Image (tube, coloured by chain):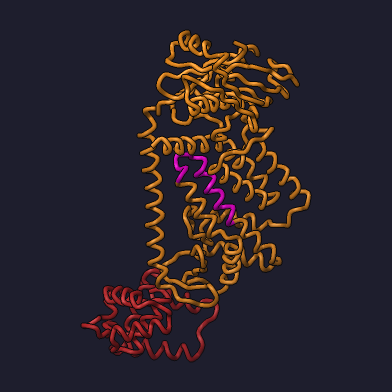
Amino acid sequence: MGQVEARFASIIWDREPVTASELARLASAELGWKKTTSYTVLKRLCDKGIFKNDGGTVTSLLSREDFQAMQSRQTVDAAFGGSLPAFVAAFTRGRGLSEAEREQLRALIDGEGER
Amino acid sequence: MDGMYTLFTALLNRSLTAAPLLLAAILVRPLLTRLSRRAMWILWVLTAVRLLLPAPRGPLSVFGFLGPAPADCWDVPFFRAVGLGVAPTLTLNLNGLAEGIGTATHAVVEPMRQPSAYLPPLMRIWALGVGVLAAWALVSCLLLRRRLSEAVHLWDNVWICDGIRAPFVYGLFRPKIYVPSGTDGACLPSVLVHERAHIRRRDYIWKPLGFALLALHWFNPLVWLGYALFCRDTELACDESVLRALDGEGRREYCEALLSLSDGRRTVLVHPVAFGETGVRERVRRAARYKKPARWAACLSVLLCAVIAMGFASVPAGGLTAGHRRTVGGSAVYTRADIESAMDEAERAFQMNFAGCVLRSLTYDEARYGKANDAWAESSGAAQAIVLTSDFYVIFGDGSLEERETYRNWQWILTRDDGPWTVITWGYG
């Protein structure tokens, strides 16, 4: 999702449920888009399965967190062959992990282990 | 329809006679761009004008060895106005030169007045080519507009957009700079300076105009090459104007921006004028070793440009006929329009074959030459003949005419069957 599209999606996630026409008005105010442009982008995002437009009311099928998780997984798959350790190694390369971050990771792994 | 054919053959003429100029521009480009970018740009403009408009006459034209040019379309007539596939009238001059000087007075001009059979299908093919290019341009324009409708305004005339791969300028009347949404912030200043240079130079107008010219001359491969190089030159020129304003550190940043934003695509022919698309390797190489050119370089480049322009962009001067006096005597056989059109043909023949001479007058005197008309018609086997007389002055002839002499009552014999007049011979009876 491009940055501009992400801003549009952000509006929906912030304001949902929202009517399509209200959404168009918000997009016009924040992005300067025509109504038709908003409807076009909305349709595209609905086709991608992120949002749905139920007779004029727009709600999300994927929450923001779910979507970001999906994006991250795609990044790790694409760049690190699905290997999370490789991703973390790359992420921390040159700067190391702070104590707080290490604690967070430990808690996360322990939490996962218990599942 | 005749007018269309005339225009079409004029276009073919221009394309062919502009080819040496194009070739010269392409060959001299490596040297000229190194000396002065502005001179190269002027040369491109000259080439574009040459492809569109009739050529001016000049003393140093390289076409001079082929013979003088007629005044009607001010083109070297490789393709005669409505005929195609006929031996170019200029080769007659070459024959004359080869055989010796004396034959010049009896050279026969053989224009073809019936439209050649090749012309209509050729013109249809040409129109098809133009249509294809125009349609392609229109479609890509519409697709681009659709993507740009989702752009978001940042500041001034800078917009950010998701679906584009490289920054560019778009818009004929109110040009806007569009930047891809993922652009690295560090590159942004360089990008904006470059795009603003494009706006300053009005490249968003020249490039589409050049493409329109390309559409008209699509059959000429040199025009394609010239246009591609012209696009590349506009990018290099913008790079240069940016680098002129930067110091060493800034220049390095600019080069890095160029490298990081290129995606290896080939030259884009239609608008938009993009940042990272055109010949990146060449641009980075030049940007890296850029230094301001010296004054002598600018002078030399202007000289070079002028020499090429005079040699290739002009056509040779022919016989001068402006301001000649016409006397149309009374006639029992021909209307005034008949006589005038015969005089037009004689004038054309003079322009083509009497370089360095000045036509002073053309006269039709039926009282004196009426009988000669019939005799000529009979001996040449045509339906009608007409004898015109002229006075002309020789400034510098081709050797067969005496210099600084006035020739009086020089005859021009024209015949016709049921078409227009054609000159069959001239001289003193």
Q: Quadrant of residue B289?
A: bottom right
Please report the residue visible at 51 percent of the width from the left and 87 percent of the height from the top.
Answer: A98
Q: Residue at 71% of width from left, 20% of height from top?
A: B406
In-front residue for pair B310/B68: B68
On the picture, is B297 further left or further right than B33? right
Q: Is residue B149 visible?
A: yes
**Picture residue at 51% right of the left edge, 77% below the top:** B154
Q: Where A20 sits versus B145, above or below?
A: below
In front here: B391 or B255? Answer: B391
How far across and how far down the image is residue B386, in percent?
51, 17
Q: Colour of chain B?
A: orange
Residue B71 included in the magenta stretch of the image: no
Q: Position of residue A76 (x, y in %)?
A: 39, 73
Q: Is residue B222 magenta?
A: yes
- Write down the region rendered in magenta: B216-235
Chain A takes which shade in the image?
red
Quarter of the image with the N terminus of chain B is top left
Q: Position of residue B124 (x, y in %)?
A: 36, 39
